[in-house]
Amino acid sequence: MKEVTPMDRRVEILVEERSMEEFLKGFLPRILPDGFSLGFNCFIHAHEGKQHLMKMLPNRLRAYQYYPLEVFLIVIHDQDSADCLEVKARIQKIISENAPRLPHLIRIACRELENWYIGDLAAVEQLYPASKSAKLSKKAKFRNPDLLTGSDELKMMTKEFSKISCARKIASIIQIDGNKSVSFGHFVSGIRRILGR
């Protein structure tokens, strides 16, 4: 029996908005196992918000069964103000109903992508030196960044913050390990596990 290699697989990553796409373009090459590369066998698809993602998901799932390569699906969704377990269960239900055998990973960014940045305030300060944000990491408020609203916190730290620009730039400097965001840690470990690193 022929051994399955990364060349026999295709990774489809569905995200709800462009800022996550921009972040992943810069970050994923740092953690993808050998044999996987963006634009070759690993593709990111940004949607126009979470409703658009959820609307498109069933059609995409049904199409994946006709792909000539084995598809691994990764869905990344912001928690925002919802219950993260409910969000994950809703996505799981759609996958189970439309592609029950599809290998997949669902990750919820708690509460939003920017919370992952808050988990590494040294990286935020490197990107925005005037913010002096690294010293904030000792404050109790920032011990669990997943409880904050990351974009609001970044706006308070610096007027220079913009979602797309920050996503592009911080992706190459954010710490892979040691980030205080638990959901970021789950995202990294999940990618490594499902893709075999």
Image (spheres, helix red, strand yellow):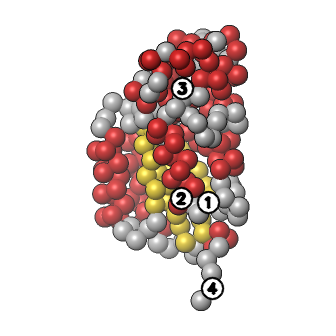
Label 3's element?
helix
Q: Amino acid at mark 4?
A: Lys
| Residue at 59%, 89% in the rendered image | 1
Q: Residue at x 49, y 34 (%)?
A: 181
Residue at 70 percent across and 36 percent down: it is 172
Find residue 123 and report its image quarter: top right
Q: Which is more foreground, mark 2 or mark 4?
A: 2
**Quarter-of-image position of residue 146:** top left
Q: Amino acid at mark 1?
A: Arg
- The amino acid type, in three-letter code, at marker 3 is Ile
Assign a secondary structure to mark 4: loop
Q: Quadrant of residue 7?
A: bottom right
Residue under numbered circle 3: 118
Query: Mark 2 or 4 closer to N-term?
Result: 4
Q: Which residue is mark 4?
A: 2
Instruction: Locate residue 152, reporting x and y percent.
Output: 47, 18
Q: Residue at x 46, y 56 (%)?
A: 105
Q: Measure the C-alpha gap from mark 1 to mark 4.
A: 20 Å
For the residues labelled 3 and 4, the Cα–Cα distance comes to 44 Å
Tell me if label 1 and label 2 are in contact, CB under 8 Å. Answer: yes
Q: Which residue is mark 2?
A: 193
Q: Which mark is residue 197?
A: 1
